[in-house]
Amino acid sequence: QAQLEESGGGLVQPGGSLRLSCKVPRSIWRIDVMGWYRQAPGKQRELVAAITNGGRTRYADSVKGRATISRDNWTNTMSLQMNGLGPEDAAVYYCNAGGEARGSWGQGTQVTVSS
């Protein structure tokens, strides 16, 4: 499977913002759907946001209005902008291309929300 490269995690203050980026290999860039997942300690992995090849987006209820997923066809990069971060957003974030069951994954990037 193709390897995705994430960047942008780190420590964020409550109420702050972050932008995660995921470099997707050109060989799979046209895949039907890509997305961001996250997993907090002791919790199941959950979908945060997804975007289709045609640009349709879907968000988890917990991030609606605070998150924006996008894709840049020039740089083969998928991004997730999140605002108004709270402790509930702290997790390891993974980018995915091709769906949860069979898709390719990034290595994960830690997001910590703390003052």
Image (cartoon, rainbow, N blue to C red):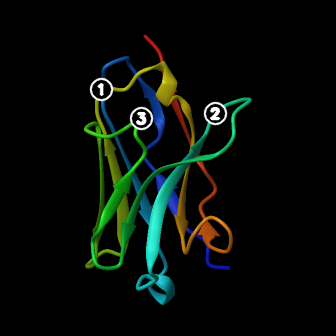
Image coordinates for residue 48, horizontal then vertical, percent = 46, 47
Image coordinates for residue 97, horizontal then vertical, percent = 52, 71
Location of mark 1 (residue):
84
Q: CA distance from mark 2 to mark 1?
A: 18 Å
Identify the amino acid type marked 1: Gly
Image coordinates for residue 13, horizontal then vertical, percent = 38, 18
Location of mark 2 (residue):
40
Cβ atoms at labels 2 and 1 below 8 Å apart: no
Helix, strand or loop at label 3? It is loop
* Neighbour tally class for label 3: few under 14, some 14-19, many 20 plus, Cα within 10 Å: few
Identify the amino acid type marked 2: Ala
Q: Nearer the viewer, residue 2 or 43?
A: 43
Q: Residue at x 31, y 74 (%)?
A: 75
Q: Residue at x 62, y 64 (%)?
A: 100
Residue 110 marker: none
Q: Residue furthest top?
A: 115
- Name the quarter where the C terminus is drawn: top left
Residue 62 marker: 3
Q: Earlier in the sequence, mark 3 or mark 1?
A: 3
Q: Is residue 44 left or right of residue 71?
A: right
Would you identify the image quadrant in which residue 58 lies?
A: bottom left
In this rendering, the answer to whether 81 lies above or below 50 is above
Q: Residue at x 62, y 78 (%)?
A: 2
- Name the quarter where the N terminus is drawn: bottom right
Q: Residue furthest front?
A: 61
- Tell us which disc is closer to us: 3 or 2: 3
Identify the amino acid type marked 3: Ser
* Neighbour tally class for label 1: few under 14, some 14-19, many 20 plus, Cα within 10 Å: some
Helix, strand or loop at label 1? It is loop
Cβ atoms at labels 3 and 1 below 8 Å apart: no
In this rendering, the answer to whether 29 lies above or below 40 is below
